Image (cartoon, rainbow, N blue to C red):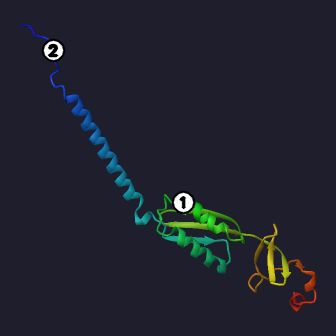
Amino acid sequence: MAYYPRTQPKRPWFNRARFLIVIVIVIALGWGLTRFTYRLLHLKALSVQEVRITGCTPRRQVEIQRISEDLSLGQPLLWFNAEPLMNALMEKTWIKSVNLSKDPPDRLVIIIEEKEAYLWMVNAQGTYLVSEGGVLIDELNSSNGSKALPVVSDASLQNRASLARM
């Protein structure tokens, strides 16, 4: 018994159909995987629910808390972009450095280092605390004026009563 050689393939469309089925399966798996990871990574448990701030005075902590909560609450913790928050905090003249860390599952920890005052500057507008680089930190008040520092004043204010009290 002799077999005759085939001149045409058995099923010419089969290779193309198999290729299309594999492509459809790969696309479906990719779509399903992206939906699953999106749901997993955007869970409420993995979003920023609390912001903890340390290293600054209570009066300033309220201000930093307000700014940080506006920019971070509800954001996914794993995908949180800290750059806008760092820029907003560094705009404050009294902040020397900011350290930001993520504390899973739902907490953002901000450590603030304040600039240190080196002198009091007295001018016609008032009395200010000045940092090492000559940056005005804050206006002098009862909460930040307890440290004895050198006083620099305008020469025309030498007879001013407020300067004499210092």
Q: The N terminus is located in which quarter?
A: top left
- Asked if residue 12 is positioned above or below residue 91 in the image, the reply reads above
Quote the CA–CA distance across marks 1 and 2: 64 Å
Query: Is residue 138 toward the left or the right of residue 58 in the image?
Result: right
Please state which amino acid type lies under the numbered disc 1.
Answer: Asn
Quick one: 58 or 166, which is closer to the camera?
166
Q: The C terminus is located in which quarter?
A: bottom right
Spot occupied by residue 5 in the image (x, y as percentages of width and height):
14, 11
Q: Residue furthest bottom?
A: 161
Q: Secondary structure at mark 2?
A: loop
Query: Is residue 72 toward the left or the right of residue 6 in the image?
Result: right
- Asked if residue 19 is positioned above or below residue 1 in the image, the reply reads below
Please state which amino acid type lies under the numbered disc 2.
Answer: Thr
Tell me what residue is drawn at x 42 percent, y 58 percent. Answer: 41
Quick one: 48 or 105, which is closer to the camera?
48
Spot occupied by residue 61 in the image (x, y as percentages of width and height):
63, 76
Name which quarter of the figure residue 8 lies in. Answer: top left
**Residue that badge 1 annotates:** 81
Spot occupied by residue 135 in the image (x, y as percentages of width and height):
78, 70
Q: Nearer the viewer, mark 1 or mark 2?
A: 2
Tell me what residue is drawn at x 66 percent, y 65 percent. Answer: 98
**Residue that badge 2 annotates:** 7
Spot occupied by residue 69 in the image (x, y as percentages of width and height):
54, 72
Q: Secondary structure at mark 1?
A: loop
Name which quarter of the figure residue 147 lies in. Answer: bottom right
Neighbourhood count class around disc 2 (C-alpha, 10 Å): few under 14, some 14–19, many 20 upward: few
